Amino acid sequence: MASNDSKTWLLLIHQIPPKPNALRVKIWRRLQQVGAVAIKPSVYAMPFSEQSREDLSWTLKEIVDGGGDGSLSEARFIEGLTDEQIIAMFQNTRTSDYEKIIQEANLLIAEWSSGGDSPHDPAVKGAAQVSKLRRRLDNIAAIDFFRAPERGTAEILLKELAKRLSGQSETAAASYRERREDLSGKTWVTRRNLFVDRIACGWLIRRFVDPAAAFKFVSDPQYTPKPGELRFDMFGGEYTHEGDCCTFEVMIRRLQFQDRALVPLAEVVHDIDLKDDKFGRPETVGFNVLLTGLGASQPNDDERMTEGFRLFDNLYAYYQRRKRE
């Protein structure tokens, strides 16, 4: 039976004639633009809202005007496909969109950090490139109904690019060093919908900084910390991306960890989070699959963090053994 808190969905069920092919392509593009996801052949879903109803109603009209047929329904899923599975479909679709933004932003950061191209050189057109990426990110975010994990990484990288354009120094935070003992008893705040970088940082905190550390997951990317709170992997956070380093790498450097097994672990986290294949370790692909499966099967962030810790414990133990050998 459907639970009381099950979601209401809008379903567009259509039949489009095989000819002309232009109509099929037009409708497919239209559904991509509004953020609908195919849950079955010719069955598209969107979370229930007035905007979704309007978008799908116009799409249905285009189908009928083109000689096709269809219907628009409100639905709850009772058996078979679950709300969590549908949400995962939406997140996976948006993930692929964000990954393209992340890759292009990383490429710009690498070019601007190498000393070759300057973002302020008129020939480079740095402002235009960043503005174009920002528009694409805004368009994707507008149809990211369930906030895919990669959205935060893309936002952090875009703000890093904007900071470089404005001439702000990105090295001030990197020169700061903390005493680990001063970090005990803190509440560590990060964005909801955890994925690799945030789980890795949580694992590092619990294992090496404060075994009793408390975590808080927030939806507001501009969250203002309360006394006793530290933010990580959030723009403006006390620990976040710096240049082409993910938050996990930044924490290891700033807390001056000398554990050699953390080096390959950080390389795996970097490549999964920033998607630039900088290190190319063979175990990265498999570990990414495990984390992606964890995200799809465990929507609760507290449980996702706990289960993610076990994955990182295992990979860390593997690298410890490799170092001893």
Image (spheres, grey):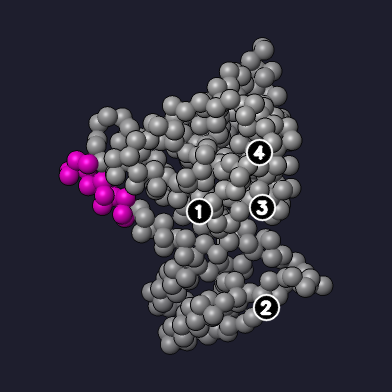
User: Which residue is outermost to the front?
Assistant: 227
Image height of 321 relative to 44, above or below? above
Residue type indicated by callout 2: Ala
From the top left corner, tell me how far across and down residue 217 is, in percent. 64, 50
Q: Secondary structure at mark 3?
A: helix
Pointer 2: what residue?
A: 75
Residue contact between numbered discs 3 and 1, judged by CB atoms under 8 Å:
no
Q: Is residue 278 left or right of residue 71?
A: left
Residue count near mark 2 (Cα–Cα under 10 Å), binned few <14, some 14–19, many ≥20: some
Quarter of the figure that contains the C terminus: top right
Q: Quadrant of residue 171?
A: top left
Pointer 4: what residue?
A: 186
Whichever of callouts 3 and 1 sits on the residue coming sooner in the sequence is 1
Whichever of callouts 4 and 1 sits on the residue coming sooner in the sequence is 4
User: Which residue is outermost to the right?
Assistant: 1
Pointer 1: what residue?
A: 222
Disc sitting over residue 257 in the figure: none
Q: Which stretch did the figure color magenta?
A: 120-132
Whichever of callouts 3 and 4 sits on the residue coming sooner in the sequence is 4
Foreground mark, 3 or 1, reads 1
